[in-house]
Amino acid sequence: AQSVTQPDIHITVSEGASLELRCNYSYGATPYLFWYVQSPGQGLQLLLKYFSGDTLVQGIKGFEAEFKRSQSSFNLRKPSVHWSDAAEYFCAVGAGTYKYIFGTGTRLKVLA
Amino acid sequence: KAGVTQTPRYLIKTRGQQVTLSCSPISGHRSVSWYQQTPGQGLQFLFEYFSETQRNKGNFPGRFSGRQFSNSRSEMNVSTLELGDSALYLCASSLEGREQFFGPGTRLTVL
């Protein structure tokens, strides 16, 4: 079955520290992969996407993610977290045309 | 280019009523998807429309329905509202079946 797992429900980091949010997926073919960010009460904003090619993708707001086929992972990273990065982050898989599966989200708290 | 818009942004209804939510996709996008987001269940896929046809459907009861118009605008309807229908309803549009662009959502509260 197709699925997306975000094993960390909550993560707390200090401002200026590095960040890695984990995402594992289960999908038979090479998937399209996405990371979205959601601020409270708002919609989801696309941070970055992977379709093919270079497995290290750069996104907005200084985020990057690396696709590792052998580990079925697509972890999101940022070298230095800012207080404004506090939000909920969702990993998603494009499981066929126009069908998407979302993880349950990781809520990021940033300590000043 | 304008983003995805959803109206209304907030709704309060009582049990047993029905509600209609509206979504206008990004210009040129023909695919519109709807999601229900709740703290307990996360993001759950409701349905997807393309060129006025429902192509994908999630696992929701028949009380949840939708439609898409020729200009790609979409509506979803929930009949006989239950307390558990309280949620943020998100609409997303897509151009070529790749990334989705989300609207700000409609917060529905059922009393």
Image (spheres, rainbow, N blue to C red):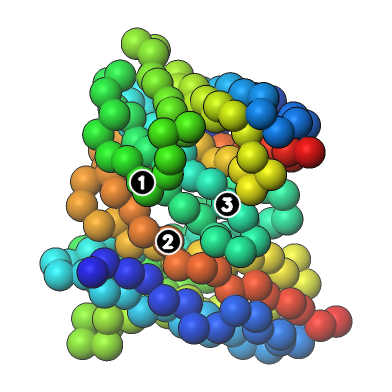
Compare residues B74 and B65 and report the one nearer the observer. Answer: B65
Looking at the rendered structure, the secondary structure element under dot 1 is loop
Residue A104 in view, yes or no: yes
Write down the residue under mark 1.
B58
Q: Of discs 3 and 1, which sits in the foreground? A: 1
Residue A78 on image: x %, y %: 56, 78
Residue A86 disc label: none
User: Which residue: 74% across, 77% down?
Assistant: A109
C-alpha distance separating marks 2 and 1: 13 Å
Q: Residues within 10 Å of mark 1 (few under 14, many from 20)?
A: few
Which sits earlier in the primary sequence, circle 3 or circle 1? Answer: 3
Q: Chain of mark 3?
A: B
Write down the residue under mark 2.
A102
* Same chain shared by disc 3 and disc 1: yes
Looking at the rendered structure, the secondary structure element under dot 2 is strand
Looking at the rendered structure, the kind of residue marked 3 is Gln
Looking at the rendered structure, the kind of residue marked 1 is Gly
Q: Are marks 3 and 1 in contact (CB under 8 Å)?
A: no
Q: Of discs 3 and 2, which sits in the foreground? A: 3
Residue A55 in view, yes or no: no
Which quadrant would residue A89 be assigned to in this image?
bottom right
Write down the residue under mark 3.
B37
User: Which residue: 47% across, 33% down?
Assistant: B64
User: Is residue A78 shown left or right of residue B62?
Assistant: right
Which quadrant would residue A111 be assigned to in this image?
bottom right
Q: Is residue B84 above or below residue B34?
A: below
